[in-house]
Amino acid sequence: MATSKGVIQGYTGVAAVDDRHQIIVEAQAHGTGSEQSLLIPVVEATEPLCTPATLITADAGYHSAANLKTLTEKNRPALIADNQMRNRDERFKDQARHKAQPDPLYDKAHPKKGASHYRPKDFDYDPDAGTCICPAGKMLYQNGSNCNHNGHLAVKFQGALRDCGPCTLRDKCLRKPDITPARQVCFFRGKAANGQGRGAACRRRPKHWKSAHKGISRGSNTASGSSVAEAA
């Protein structure tokens, strides 16, 4: 049987129910996935049980212009929902929140989760100036420019304790804000050549960086000199 999920071994079962007595008066099985072509066979099979007052009801799966025309020709009163009925009915305005989840049997891909913490792309990194600004607008200091991480060279930055400690974004910046004092972030520069940046060793910032850092941090309430001493 052809279905929206491919060809499967199965059938479509159709049943007609007497709503007054709550019993099944007709049942059929068909090797097709389309319900539209199955309405009229059931209506014809139940004709001996119908009276002039019998009202046929069916869901939107049985709605088609051909079925409506045939019922009219047979003079059979019927109420068959169309595909847009729920969009017009105020009682179904909140139906979206009850939408069924995708069938895991056919879609086993894990749903993509958004990043719960700030990633390196959220930091303003200037490779030419050698500076990095965190999402809170604080300047991080560079504590390594030639670090080897699994064969890739990286530039490392770390936030100052005076900035990270009282920061209101700790929960979004640190995975363990209760025990991690400051944020660290790496920016990769490519693969390391043989012997370049061996192990976890990093080349510290040059001595002249201290004066450059003072120029960048001018206007801060904390002296730049203490910031550099803290990073050492």
Image: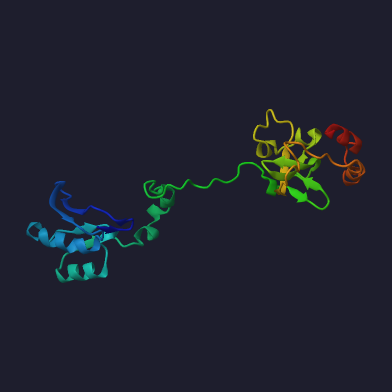
Which residue of the protein is positioned furthest toward the front in this rendering? 194
Q: Residue at x 78, y 46 (%)?
A: 132
Nearer the observer, 84 or 136: 136
In the image, 64 versus 30, the foreground residue is 30
Q: For residue 51, say whether it is visible.
A: no
Looking at the image, which residue is at 18% across and 59% down?
A: 55
Q: Residue at x 91, y 40 (%)?
A: 207
Q: Please state the horizontal and vertical placement of residue 84, each as a whole percent of the image.
A: 36, 62
Q: Vertically, is 11 above or below 176?
A: below
Query: Extreme left residue here?
Result: 48
Q: Is residue 167 left or right of residue 75?
A: right
Q: Is residue 48 above or below residue 111?
A: below
Q: Quadrant of the N terminus?
A: bottom left
The location of residue 183, given as percent across then percent down, is 73, 37
Marker count (numbered):
0
Residue closest to the eye, 96 or 106:
106
Place residue 211 in its image quadrant: top right
Instruction: Name the colouring of the figure.
Output: rainbow
| Residue at screen point 88% across, 38% down | 221
66, 116: nearer the viewer: 116
Farthest-out residue, top: 179
* Camera sees residue 177: yes
Quadrant of the rendered image containing residue 226? top right
Q: Please state the horizontal and vertical placement of residue 76, each as a whole percent of the image.
A: 16, 65
Q: Is residue 107 left or right of residue 33?
A: right
Horizontal side, residue 110 vs residue 151: left or right: left
Quadrant containing the C terminus is top right
Vertical relation: 232 (above or below) 134: above
In the image, 29: left or right of 230? left
